[in-house]
Amino acid sequence: MPRAVFLDRDGVLIEDKHYLRHPDQVALLPGVPAGLERLLQAGFLPVVVSNQSGVGRGYFTEAEVDAVHARLQALLAARGIPLAHFYYCPHAPAKTPDEPGCACRKPAPGLILAAVSELGICLSDSYMIGDKRSDVGLGRAVGIPAILVTTGHGATELQRPGPTPDHVAADLDAAARWIVAREKARIRS
């Protein structure tokens, strides 16, 4: 069974452009190519899990989300880095605390559970990397370590209440280094 690193998209892999809908605005964040290469070399499957509530709010279509993902894939493929698995929640958040939300909007576990089911992922050997407390909450919801990166909203999120990350990293490459070091220490013990 493959092990995975689940990755938020905006603020972790690419610049957060606030309801990004145009593929030409996709820009990789520093540390992304090196971090993905490091994770792939360590045997992890990178899987994107992202809230895309702009679909549910009517700001853009699922086809536009797919076009943004295709652009992200192309930018990484040009560097020899495969990124094939994207799971996203298209729903707007619940309007009131009493309204039931969907099962896939982070921090609900639906996106990761779908990936585990479809890809045969070994969840107990996997990780979550994000720039928001909801990403950390998703890691907690499925029982895996969660890393908060300070790119995107991460630095601001650290000041807010919410689930505590297992580690805080400057960017994806620093998070990948921590994961690889942690795995090596686990193997030795």
Image (tube, grey):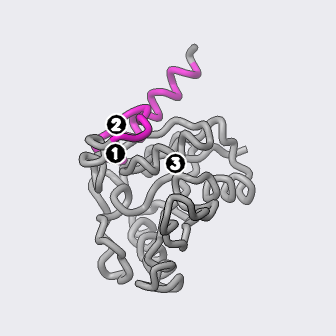
Residue beneath the point at 30% across and 43% down: 160
Q: Residues within 10 Å of mark 2 (few under 14, many from 20)?
A: many
Task: Tell me: residue 172, above or below residue 53.
Answer: above
Q: Percent position (x, y) of residue 22? A: 35, 83
Looking at the image, residue 44 sits to the left or right of residue 129; the answer is right
Q: Is residue 171 magenta?
A: yes
Task: Residue 85: tell me if it is visible.
Answer: no
Q: Which of labels 2 and 3 is toward the front?
A: 2
Residue beneath label 1, please?
A: 149
Q: Earlier in the sequence, mark 2 or mark 3?
A: 3
Residue beneath the point at 62% across and 42% down: 142
Task: Tell me: residue 151, above or below residue 14.
Answer: above
For the residues bearing labels 2 and 3, Cβ distance under 8 angstroms: no
**Cα distance, mark 2 to mark 3?**
21 Å
| Residue at the limit of the structure toward the top, as seen here | 189
Residue beneath label 2, please?
A: 168
Q: Residues within 10 Å of mark 1 (few under 14, many from 20)?
A: many
Which of 64 and 153 lies nearest the eye of the viewer? 153
For the residues bearing labels 1 and 3, Cβ distance under 8 angstroms: no
Give the structural element (helix, strand or loop) at label 2. Answer: strand
* The N terminus, quarter of image: top right
Magenta stretch: give its range: 161-187
Q: Earlier in the sequence, mark 2 or mark 1?
A: 1
Q: Percent position (x, y) of residue 140? A: 55, 39
Residue beneath the point at 61% across and 62% down: 100
Q: How many marks?
A: 3
For the residues bearing labels 2 and 1, Cβ distance under 8 angstroms: yes
Q: Percent position (x, y) of residue 159? A: 26, 41
Residue beneath label 3, please?
A: 40
Q: Earlier in the sequence, mark 1 or mark 3?
A: 3
